[in-house]
Image (spheres, grey):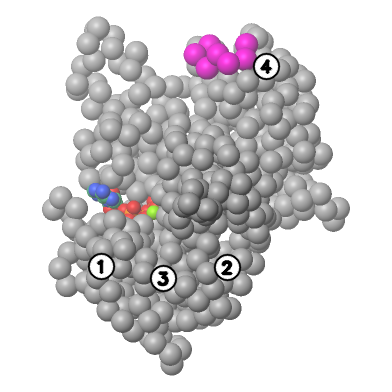
Amino acid sequence: MNPDQRAPRLDLRAVSKTFGGTRVLHDVSLDIAPGEVHALVGQNGSGKSTLIKILAGFHEADPGASALVDGRPRSLGDPDDIHDAGVRFVHQDLGLVPALSVVDNLALGHGYARGMGGRINWRRQTAAAEAALRAIGYEVDVRALVEDLQPVERTAVAIARALQSAQGEMSVLVLDEPTATMPKAEVQRLFEIINTVRQQGVGILYVSHHLEEVFELADRVTVLVDGHRVATKRCSELDQRGLVDLMTGGVVDEARQRSTTVPGEPLLALRGVRGAEIVELDLQVLAGEVVGVAGITGSGREELCSLIFGAKPREGRVTVRGRELPALRPHTACALGMALVPANRLRDGIVSGLNVRENANLTTVRRLARHVRIRPRDDRRQAASISTKMSVKAPSLESPIESLSGGNQQKVVLGKWLQTDPHVLLLDEPTQGVDIKAKAEIHHLIDDVASKGVAVLVCSSDEAELERLCDRVLVLRHGRVVSEFNGAEVQTRRLVHTSLGLTS
Ligand SMILES: Nc1ncnc2c1ncn2[C@@H]1O[C@H](COP(=O)(O)OP(=O)(O)OP(=O)(O)O)[C@@H](O)[C@H]1O
Ligand SMILES: [Mg+2]
């Protein structure tokens, strides 16, 4: 129970939720003491975001649920009442309006600064937005549209928006996977902010698939399995292994299955590549090799895959299997056997409005359409095979893609590209938002793909993932390679240090 004698800042009781006949939350209760960081963990689809969306008033709970904030009953399902109670959110899909600027998005939560006659004072508004982002360590062009920002910058905007409340106004801060695209250095900065907020007595609900973050930050942790709360424990009573066992009921096999590379021919080669952030880059990836790229936000890591694939303008030469790939020609890239799994799942990865089957089959529509019309049986069979191979958890292949949990959407995106049998596979944050068990499965799939002679380039903010996957890792700083690590030299600590420009 609540270790603190004061009234919990948040006391959620008996929350259940049924979507179209399927119960995804079963009688879940959870409380957060003042100044406590309470972690909420569970595999993809276990119900974490649904619980949070119910608290936010985005979904209605099944009858019987209740919420108290600072001892006072609040009406679940009423976003205004929860906001008035001082509960603030950084949602997994961030809840920003992509077509509006950063300034506008920040104002949505808070209102615009007004001058004489009630007119919006844009200069003050812009300065305030810049200051809010600088306070959490990000320099962002606040006039830019949110849809044009990098994933981590978008997270920063959502965090800045949640933090805008004056001191004393915020009772609970809810963060749903805020670090999914953050390198470790930035995670540390976020933790400093969270610790400042907690010292003000705010209760914090923190969702993450990175269990080391849970142990570093949280006082207690609640574990969901298939919508059931299976445990709430003090973090000091547990170790990582114990927590994994609670979440998965078993051991996760993280061991690498691929032997070290037998170098093949170079399938991907870059010479003098330049982009918005990348100043100069030469790089080769051989058949069967997995090459990683590390770097903090702004290092060039985030744009590299899109530059190569042709989704963003670039200069310099890119060749695929010896054939030149002109800039801005994604179709040619596909034709040459290149596939890209983009980092920005919501914008580039999934097509909302289509169901799981349609999303899974998007990349091979042509191959399926052998008989002019797509045969529904082939279509279903292929989608089913992707879904099984990737262990996608979805009510059915006909479910709308938006109804899948974040991690399961990511598996569909990855699966649809893997089935194109590429020669060169570009992976940008391949396991963002994916739970540890699915992550291990995806890592095995990447091992497999490389063993078959595919050249794989992985850009990731998760340095431990690079250590697990890569034969070789390049570290970018200020748009250039500052270090290269090979084989056993590829170690998380080294990657983090070099990314930060520290000499260890
Ligand atoms: N709008 C919806 N309609 C139907 N089913 C839904 C909807 N939203 C979520 N679900 C289902 O509810 C279950 C819980 O999903 P939820 O998004 O809460 O998982 P999660 O624990 O946040 O997972 P992740 O770690 O992948 O983000 C999933 O099976 C999901 O498919
Ligand atoms: Mg979620």
Which circle's residue, 3 or 1, is located before the other in the chain? 1
Of 290 and 120, nearer the camera is: 120
* Residue contact at pointers 4 and 3, CB within 8 angstroms: no
Q: Which circle marks residue 76 in the picture? A: 1
Q: How far apart are marks 4 and 1 (CA)?
A: 54 Å
Alpha-carbon neighbours of circle 1 within 10 Å: few (<14), some, or many (≥20)?
Answer: many
Residue 32 in view, yes or no: yes
Residue 144 percent across, percent down from the top left: 57, 37
Alpha-carbon neighbours of circle 3 within 10 Å: few (<14), some, or many (≥20)?
Answer: many
Which circle's residue, 1 or 2, is located before the other in the chain? 1
Residue under circle 2?
A: 194
Q: Is residue 67 above or below residue 95?
A: below
Q: In screen coordinates, is 347 left or right of 301?
A: left
Q: Look at the numbered disc 2 and give the secondary structure of its residue.
A: helix
Q: Is residue 328 magenta?
A: yes
**Res. 315 image quadrant:** top right
Q: In screen coordinates, is 415 left or right of 279?
A: left
Residue under circle 3?
A: 86
Q: Give the range drawn in magenta.
A: 326-332
Of 337 and 22, nearer the camera is: 22
Residue under circle 4?
A: 318
Q: Does the magenta stretch include residue 353?
A: no
Q: Which circle marks residue 166 in the picture? A: none
Residue 223 in view, yes or no: no
Looking at mark 3, is its residue's CB closer than 8 Å to ligand 2? no
Residue 329 percent across, percent down from the top left: 55, 13
Q: How far apart are marks 3 and 1 (CA)?
A: 14 Å
Identify the residue shown where x is 81% and y is 49%. 501
